[in-house]
Amino acid sequence: MKTLILFTVALSAVVLTGCGTSGSLRDYSDEASVLHRSMVTIDTHADTPIRLLRDDFDPAQWHTPSGDEGKIDFPRMKFGGLDAVFFAAFIAQGPRTQAGNEKAYAMVSAIIDSIHAVVNRNHDVAALAVASADAARIKASGKSAVYIGIENGYALGNDLSLVTKFYDLGVRYITLCHSKDDDICDSSSDTSSVKYDGLSAFGKRVVREMNALGMIVDISHVSDKSFYDVLALSTVPVIASHSCARALCNNPRNMDDAMLKALAENGGVIQVSLVSEFLKTPLVLPLRDSALQALRGKYSGIGHLSAEQRLMMKNERKDINARYPRPLPTVSDVADHIDHCVQVAGIDHVGIGTDFDGGGEVDGCFDVSEMKNITAELLRRGYSHNEIRKIWGGNFLRVFAQVEASAQNRRN
Ligand SMILES: [Zn+2]
């Protein structure tokens, strides 16, 4: 109740002053650093594994965050005060055929192998995490915790037995689909047609199987109807590993207030992402947009890019950014989404899933080394240490532990 009162006071200050903040981020950086040492911090979504497949990316090295050098490595995780991260084994939606499914499974398996290999190679600074309790244990040992998620249920094709197979490889959540419908459900961004009007029959079996195994269901990317179907079916809370609030940025990828309330009722959590187009409706910059579209078209047809081709693409993107700059959203925009989700869903149902290396970057938190700036902004807005602890991992770990316990009870 005390926190509620404090928070109400903080919100009143927003109304009274027209600006709910005082001081600069720097004024709160020491307090943020102390807080990060005492709490467990988790980012529930990063697409870093795309880089792990490359020979020239060593996550044990500190990389410069500019350009195409990636947002996460172990030294920067430490510096930024991030204790645990979910590396997403991502597969883009391809043909839903036997051959397509086999290729997707092979690709995701290779990415998972590469995550294991990277953690093993760096066992002095990192450790694989598979249980909710692992994050705190691994932090206490001074290492970075790496969890594994799968982004896109396409990796399962239409084979239910793969859920167990992936669970045994350490996967602890599956994002049911990506930007297109798969065999599990309709996607929020597939405008071609409504295939299932929510979850398919196979999708329902997948959700039940994940519940039974103790694997978290991730509803980021799914259509609104798919979301409600999942809530009606799942016997445990679910997560949105990287999503924002539709009230602040009207994009079908984001969650509207009714969904946020339903998620809170389910006991789940929305992990706010740092992706520009989901934080703020992008300004229309036709010259920039067409130049970037042409660039994507040019390189997407090539398939696996060589180091030389990647460098060419990077330089061409740099050139476009210099010619047609687009200002990034800021840490304050991220905090606006957190504020809104807290107001609608409650302080127990909000967290952070950056989508670093998948498009996540904002001014003030351009890479993992700047994570404490989010904390500083929340302190500046009047959040208590306990509330920030919940946002930075407490809420997500509660859901994770519930999912584990329910599966454990069924086994007993
Ligand atoms: Zn995503």
Image (cartoon, rainbow, N blue to C red):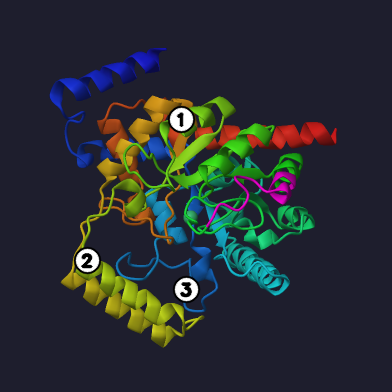
- Nearer to us of marks 2 and 3 is 2
Whether residue 196 appears in magenta in the rendering, the answer is yes
* Rendering quarter of residue 226: top right
* Number of marks in the rendered image: 3
Residue stretch in magenta: 193-205
Labels 2 and 3: the sequence-earlier one? 3
Q: Residue at x 33, y 72 (%)?
A: 293
Rendered-image quadrant of the C terminus: top right
- Nearer to us of marks 1 and 3 is 1
Disc 2 and disc 1 in contact, CB within 8 angstroms = no
Tell me residue 243's x, y (percent). Answer: 44, 45
Rendered-image quadrant of the N terminus: top left
* Amino acid type, label 1: Ala
Q: Secondary structure under badge 1?
A: helix
Is the residue marked by circle 2 packed among few (<14), some (14-19), or many (20+) residues within 10 Å? few
Identify residue for label 3: 57
Tell me residue 231's x, y (percent). Answer: 61, 34
352 or 372, nearer to the observer: 352
Tell me residue 212's x, y (percent). Answer: 76, 40
Q: Is residue 191 above or below residue 104?
A: above
Labels 1 and 3: the sequence-earlier one? 3
Q: Is residue 343 visible?
A: yes
Could you tell whether 197 is left or right of 286 in the image? Answer: right
Identify residue for label 2: 286
Residue with the most extreme front position: 193
**C-alpha separation, residue under disc 1 versus residue under disc 3:** 42 Å
**C-alpha separation, residue under disc 2 versus residue under disc 1:** 34 Å
Q: Residue at x 65, y 68 (%)?
A: 104
Q: Is residue 385 visible?
A: no
Label drawn at residue 258: 1
